[in-house]
Image: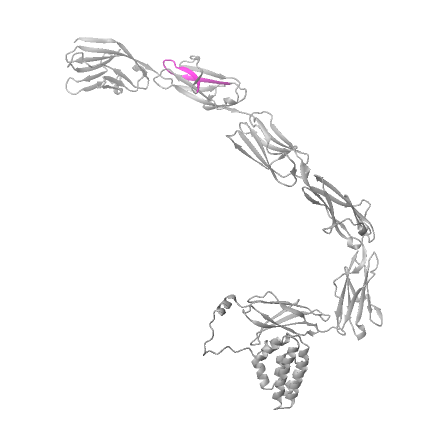
């Protein structure tokens, strides 16, 4: 066998752990010649390490387990031996021997050099602490020292520092005293704000077959804020009005702590927010200035929690506007507890205000006092003088100072002017009493101080008698006398006097005692606030007869004469609800007291028709010829209603009496006499009634029953329907009819 070695050895580099191709030329120099056997050898190994045999048919592969094992595969296309997961021991010289059918054997040589990449790379601080991801934080002016240490690698790796694509430090420091360790130290002096977030990368590489081993760290730094300022205008502020004051600190890292001080007092009602990635810190203070804050200094303070640098501050000297603070006091030599009518009184108003006041007003019982020398009111700047005061000057006094912020009202000062007793207005002056009836007559006085004694005197046209003290009761500023008239001469006038430390009452209180009677009728009755279901009536009360009176209203149905409602009230004002719509009702109003019932007053009242009913009636068809028209209201009633005023009632009653007179000619006896008396009495009394009486008689009662009474010649019933028959006449008529 002839062997021919072709050319010098070819050098191939491979990284440990990677793959490499060891090539071999299997093309024969002779045309038509083909390879039959390919053998691979390695220096130091006496036997083949791999064979590719095509001699006996299809090619077969054989591998030496001790050398490359399953990691090696020969690829005929390309004639290359592929070695995976290269190991450092795989390095050396390899031969490829190719046997051809005709051509002599060819041998090709390849030198494999295996590169071992560095195994680990770590960065340490100058204090020997390993750094991962972030280093710091540092302060401005600090020096940054980082040590990059690389273990393993053959050949020895190069260790460099980079920032992005820029080389910072390419100096190699060698083994550093440790076997298999390479290192490089990076030093940055005088760190500043631009050094924040710098990404520093240490790389270790000993071949271009693999990517360099690298580790990066980011520089972290802390800074004090660049400036602090209170935002917005710094004009005057108003006391009592809430303000939102903002303070901004820029450039602090981490965000500074913002606090507020009013002079040296901390304020806590504020919030904190950070924006622009932590570069700007904002604090908003919710604050309401007070009068006491005038001239104080509001300070915003920004303190970095980690830099230990002096805090940055911004201050605002406050000018606080406020509503005037007024304080009222009497003159220094004045004793308000001993002021009597005729004395002079003066007040002083001290004021504190910013801005200063443009007006000062003086108030008495909430009413403004005006300068009036003739009335004894003298106003001079911050003083008020009251000359020769009367009891009407008593009450609360205040001064009101006004500026652009508002009106400031002072404390009230009470002035109580001492005066002799006088009668209190609004008392009941007339008292009705029957003989032998004891009445309690109160006498209320106004005085300061309250009366210490009372005296009562009775006067009539013939004599004046002092009331014994045993009949007099005293309670506070009032006195009550118990009085019983026994004869006609005991009706007259009672006089009441009071006495206090100022003096005796000059003019007594006068009360009249007269025989009590029934109340006078109400008058001026009217209907108001018409509605579909409610009737409202109001009247004017008459004289009460000297006794307390109550008022009654009765409502009657116009057709059935049935009582619909009975309402009692302390005042002549009535309301009845729940009625039907569209009714014309009769109302009777009267008053009563302990002596009896007063004269009744009648009036017609209405409820308005329902609106839907009105619309239905508007489209109702006229009656057909075979339908009877509705029964008209009795002519007599129309005459009575139409009569309206006083004399009309007499005319109607006269007609009734005429009918009764004609009917009674056929009969006689007591019934006729009673009829005549009833008619004459009705005419006489009806003449004295109001025009509304006619509505009660002829529309408030059943007219059919009234006609029936006439046809049966029962004048007593006629008279009862007229509502005028006295009680003694009713008894007389009853006996006659029986």
Relative to 281, is 146 above or below? Answer: above
Secondary structure mostly seen in the magenta stretch: strand
In the rendered image, residue 439 lying in the magenta stretch gets the answer no
Residue name at image x 60 percent, y 78 percent: 639
> As rendered, which of 542 and 727 lies closer to the eye?
542
Vertically, is 418 above or below 134?
Answer: below
Query: In the image, 343: left or right of 284?
Result: right
Q: Is residue 161 part of the magenta span, yes or no?
A: yes
Residue drawn at 47 percent across, 16 percent down = 186
Where residue 267 sits: x, y (%)?
62, 35
Q: Is residue 2 visible to us here?
A: yes
How is the rendered protein coloured? one colour
Height in image: 68 above or below 543? above
Query: In the displayed structure, would residue 323 be above or below residue 426?
Result: above
Location of the C terminus by quadrant is bottom right
The answer to whether residue 738 shows anywhere in this view is: no
The residue range painted magenta reads 144-163
Image quadrant where one finds the N terminus: top left
Q: Give the image location of residue 91, x and y in percent.
A: 30, 13
Q: Quadrant of residue 452?
A: bottom right
Query: Between 489 and 599, which is closer to the camera in this rendering?
Result: 599
Which image quarter: residue 209?
top left
Q: Is residue 119 left or right of residue 558?
A: left
Left or right, 393 with reference to 702 = right
The image shows a total of numbered marks equal to 0
Q: Looking at the picture, how far across and down is residue 623, in whole percent?
A: 47, 75
């Amino acid at each position: 066998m002839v062997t021919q070695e072709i050319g010098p050895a070819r050098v191939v580099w491979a990284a440990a752990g990677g793959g490499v191709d060891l090539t071999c030329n299997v093309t024969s120099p002779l045309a038509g010649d083909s390879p039959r056997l390919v053998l691979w050898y390695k220096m130091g190994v006496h036997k083949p390490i791999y064979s590719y045999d095509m001699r006996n048919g299809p090619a077969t592969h054989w591998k030496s387990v001790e050398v490359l094992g399953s990691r090696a595969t020969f690829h005929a296309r390309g004639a290359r031996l592929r070695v995976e997961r290269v190991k450092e021991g795989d390095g050396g010289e390899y031969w490829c021997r190719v046997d051809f059918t005709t051509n002599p054997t060819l041998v090709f040589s390849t030198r494999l050099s295996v590169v071992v990449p560095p195994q680990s790379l770590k960065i340490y601080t100058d204090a020997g602490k390993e750094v991962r991801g972030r280093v710091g934080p540092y302060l401005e002016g600090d020096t940054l020292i980082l040590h990059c240490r690389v273990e393993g690698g053959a050949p020895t790796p190069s260790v460099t520092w980079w920032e992005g694509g820029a080389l910072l430090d390419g100096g190699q420091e060698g083994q550093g005293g440790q076997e298999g360790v390479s290192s490089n130290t990076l030093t940055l002096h005088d760190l500043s704000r631009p050094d924040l977030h710098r990404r520093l990368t240490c790389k270790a590489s000993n071949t271009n077959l693999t990517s360099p081993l690298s580790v990066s760290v980011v520089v972290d730094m802390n800074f004090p804020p660049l400036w602090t300022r209170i935002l917005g205008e710094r004009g005057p502020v108003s006391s009592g009005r809430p303000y939102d004051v903002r303070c901004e600190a820029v450039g602090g890292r981490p965000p500074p702590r913002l606090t507020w001080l009013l002079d040296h007092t901390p304020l806590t009602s504020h919030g904190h927010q950070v924006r622009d990635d932590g570069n700007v810190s904002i604090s908003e203070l919710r604050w309401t200035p007070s009068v006491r804050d005038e001239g104080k200094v509001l300070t915003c303070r920004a303190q970095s929690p980690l830099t230990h640098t002096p805090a940055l501050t911004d201050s605002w000297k406050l000018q606080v506007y406020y509503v005037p603070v007024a304080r009222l006091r009497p003159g220094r030599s004045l004793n308000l507890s001993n002021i009597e009518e005729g004395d002079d009184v003066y007040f002083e108003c001290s004021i504190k205000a910013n801005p200063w006041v443009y007006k000062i007003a003086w108030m008495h019982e909430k009413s403004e006092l005006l300068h009036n020398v003739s009335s004894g009111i003298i106003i001079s700047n911050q003083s008020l003088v009251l000359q020769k005061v009367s009891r009407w000057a008593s009450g609360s006094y205040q001064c009101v100072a006004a500026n652009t912020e508002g009106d400031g009202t002072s404390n009230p000062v009470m002035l109580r002017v001492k005066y002799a007793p006088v009668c209190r207005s609004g008392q009941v002056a007339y008292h009705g009493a029957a003989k032998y009836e004891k009445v309690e007559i109160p006498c209320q006085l106004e005085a300061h101080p309250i009366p210490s004694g009372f005296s009562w005197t009775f006067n009539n046209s013939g004599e004046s008698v002092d009331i014994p003290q045993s009949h007099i009761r005293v309670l506070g500023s009032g006195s009550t006398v118990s009085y019983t008239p026994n004869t006609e001469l005991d009706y007259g006038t009672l006089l009441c006097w009071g006495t206090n430390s100022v003096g005796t009452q000059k003019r007594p209180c006068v009360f009249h005692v007269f025989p009590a009677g029934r109340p006078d009728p109400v008058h001026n009755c009217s209907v108001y606030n018409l509605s579909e279901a409610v009737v409202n009536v109001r009247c004017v009360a008459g004289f009460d007869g000297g006794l307390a009176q109550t008022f009654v209203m009765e409502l009657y149905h116009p057709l059935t004469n049935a009582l619909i409602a009975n309402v009692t009230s302390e005042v002549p004002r009535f309301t009845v609800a729940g009625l039907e719509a569209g009714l014309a009702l009769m109302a009777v109003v009267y008053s009563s007291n302990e002596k009896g019932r007063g004269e009744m007053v009648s009036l017609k009242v209405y409820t308005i028709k329902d609106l839907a009913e009105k619309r239905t009636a508007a489209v109702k068809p006229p009656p057909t010829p075979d339908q009877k028209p509705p029964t008209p209201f009795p002519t007599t009633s129309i005459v009575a209603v139409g009569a309206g005023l006083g004399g009309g009632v007499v005319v109607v009653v006269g007609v009734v009496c005429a009918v009764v007179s004609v009917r009674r000619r056929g009969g006689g006896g007591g019934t006729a006499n009673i009829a005549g008396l009833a008619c004459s009495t009705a005419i006489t009394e009806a003449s004295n009634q109001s025009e509304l009486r006619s509505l009660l008689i002829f529309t408030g009662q059943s007219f059919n029953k009234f006609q029936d009474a006439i046809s049966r010649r029962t004048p007593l019933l006629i008279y009862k329907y007229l509502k005028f028959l006295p009680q003694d006449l009713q008894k007389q008529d009853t006996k006659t009819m029986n």
